[in-house]
Amino acid sequence: MSGHSLHSPLANSSLLPPTAPPWRIRRSPAAWMRKNLFSTPFSGVLTICFTALAAWLLYQLLSFAVFDAVWTGGQEECRANPDGACWPFIVEKFDYLRYGAYPVAERWRVDLTLIIGAVLIVWLLWKRAPQRNVAALLFFIAYPVVAFVLLRGVASLNLPVIDTVLWGGLLITLLMSVVGIVFSLPIGVLLALGRRSELPLVRAVCVIFIEVVRGVPFITVLFMANFMMPLFVPDYLTPDRLLRPLIAIALFSSAYMAEVVRAGLQAIPKGQYEAAKALGLSYFTIMRLIILPQALTIVIPGIVSTFIGLFKDTTLVAIVGIADFLRAVETARVDPNWAGPTISSTGYLFAGLVYWIFCFGMSRYSQAMEREFARGHKS
Amino acid sequence: MQAILKGLMAAAVALAASNASAATIEDVKKNGILTCGTNSATAGFSLPDNEGKWTGFVVDYCRAVAAAVLGDAQKVRFIPLTPKDRFTALQSGEIDILAHNATWTSSRDTSLGILFAGTYFYDGQGFMVRKAENIGSAKDLDGASICVTQGTTTELNLADYFRSHSISYSTVGFADEEAVVKAYEEGRCDVLSADSSTLNASRQRMANSDDSIVLPELISKEPLGPAVRQGDDHWFNVAKWTLLVMVSAEELGVTSQNVDEMKSSENPNIRRLLGVEGSIGKDLGLADTWSVDVIKQVGNYGEVFDRNIGKDSPLKMERGLNALWNQGGLQYAPPVR
């Protein structure tokens, strides 16, 4: 009797309706597909059509880039095969695409600069690396000097000075992006703080700068810097042809960055400011320790997407005669020694691949950062 | 508004002229290097090779000027320029000489503060058609659809030509040359029209390049030449005569190979050309050996043509209008004396 009564509420299964096992456990691939891809006849048809389209496109791309491609040989082999990419062309032009006209004997300096940069970036971005603030100091303070000395050269250090008209290719694209990224974030933070400042003059200057820069197309600024400035300014005061777009890109991206950062600042509840003030902290301490760390974390996607946009905007410098990576591809493809029906397509495919690798890398890193930082208030 | 803009531009040009020194040749000698503006990438005319070294027809002209002034054809700094910024770069003194595929026109000579110093390439708008169509002349193009690059003088020239010959036609316009070539290949038009200097390069990029031919007629005049700033007659002369001695050298049979033997030639024209007699070098403010330096290091006009765009190059252009005057072309140099 006692045993029976102890079990009775559970044993009497007729009182409780059977509950389904949790949805996630039961889900088989077939069930998942039925729910997500074939829930109605219409969505089933759509699924089939678009899968077929995607497969066909992928097949076209792969057959051009891989299956039918020419992997060895020269111009004749490529001309003989109008259906596939001509990779020997990329192999032969690879050095030109990376360095432009940088003198062959001095190209180790570019390599060294890039290796140092890569090591510092990995050190800086890898979360478990020791002494990451040392890496930050080296990257933001020491590295620009080292890169300048190595790339441009200093005659007294036995490094011949390389005229910037000779720089080109991926070197220019990376240089432009790194300069833009390194300068835009700090300047952007200052501009964003300035725009929210209670000092009217500071606020006015920041607002005018941001609005003027955002109101003018980047190409216009490049044209002004390149075509009008040399007409009005004496020759010895005109900055180097490469320096002009570098300055333009740094100022430009900082104006956009300022608005991204400001969005983050506005998302911080007022209580945070008030509580910090109640503790008697100074303005800069509040910003450094309380507001900015939270604000910047919120806007990581915006910051990274500004960086990605900046990386791709560097191609615009080609219109003022700077041989960036895309321009180098365009130069390489008109070489009459490699004339053929697939040369241009191969060049552009390669360019697209290189840009995608860099941009996708940045995007993935930002997603990892978000997961790392946003644990507290992720929806 | 238009007037204000024009005034601004004029002021800018005047300012620019004062920036640039009046004696370009002294600047070049002082710097020990010639700064030359060229096309950023045009097959055969101006293109960096795999190591980034500039090669091409207009590039060789710059090297010839460097050889004339500095005695060394390698002492050139090339600045690639787009069609938009090429004249500004010259006006502002950023470059010493412009060797671009720029057409010599009256308005450019008079309103831009620059002067063209001759014609190194007689270009003109031509046509490419499929061999199978059996078209021998542009006059047979009645009713043809023509692929062109939009927004260039190409379309205007077509309109002029076909109207004056009362031939009907239609154009199919594209944003850039690459798209024009693709469209022609896919059969979206019967004819491809562009400057003859680029037609051969375009033809080469096609899968079936042997199926098309370039018609012999040119329907527009596009004389391409080097340009210098106005107000520096000395430098203008150097730019002009560097080109002319290259043409003279071809006419007199002086090549980069035989220039040293030719110095002992009995022909007074050759002796004057090479500075053995006369004083052309001194009169131009150059070394007596300047013409020998040009011919030896760069070559005569024919050598430069053949090497870059003519029979020894992948482009295989005909000399056509660019043959010497005594061979049916227009290249003619006044006498050196």
Image (cartoon, coloured by chain):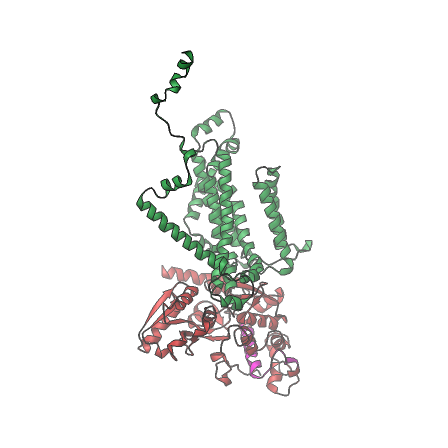
Chain colours: A green, B red
From the viewer's side, name the closer residue of A290 and B191.
B191
From the viewer's side, name the closer residue of A181 and B332.
A181
Tell me residue B194's x, y (percent).
Answer: 42, 71
Residue at image location 47% in from the left, 31% down from the top:
A376
Principal SS element in the magenta part? helix
From the viewer's side, name the closer residue of A208 and A258.
A258
Snapshot quadrant of residue B211: bottom left
Tell me if residue A244 comes above or below residue A193 in the rendering.
below
Would residue B46 be visible to someone looking at this image?
A: no
Q: Quadrant of the C terminus of chain A?
A: top left
Q: Is residue B293 left or right of residue A341?
A: right
Tell me if residue B278 comes above or below residue A60 in the rendering.
below
User: Is A216 one of the magenta-colored residues?
Assistant: no
Tell me residue A15's x, y (percent).
Answer: 34, 21
Q: Quadrant of the N terminus of chain A?
A: top left
Q: Is residue A196 left or right of residue A289?
A: left
User: Is B241 one of the magenta-colored residues?
Assistant: yes
From the viewer's side, name the closer residue of B289 and B209.
B209
Q: Residue furthest top?
A: A2
Tell me residue B215's x, y (percent).
Answer: 42, 77
Magenta segment: B236-260
Would residue B121 be visible to someone looking at this image?
A: yes
Tell me residue B249's x, y (percent).
Answer: 58, 81
Residue at image location 48% in from the left, 51% down from the top:
A312
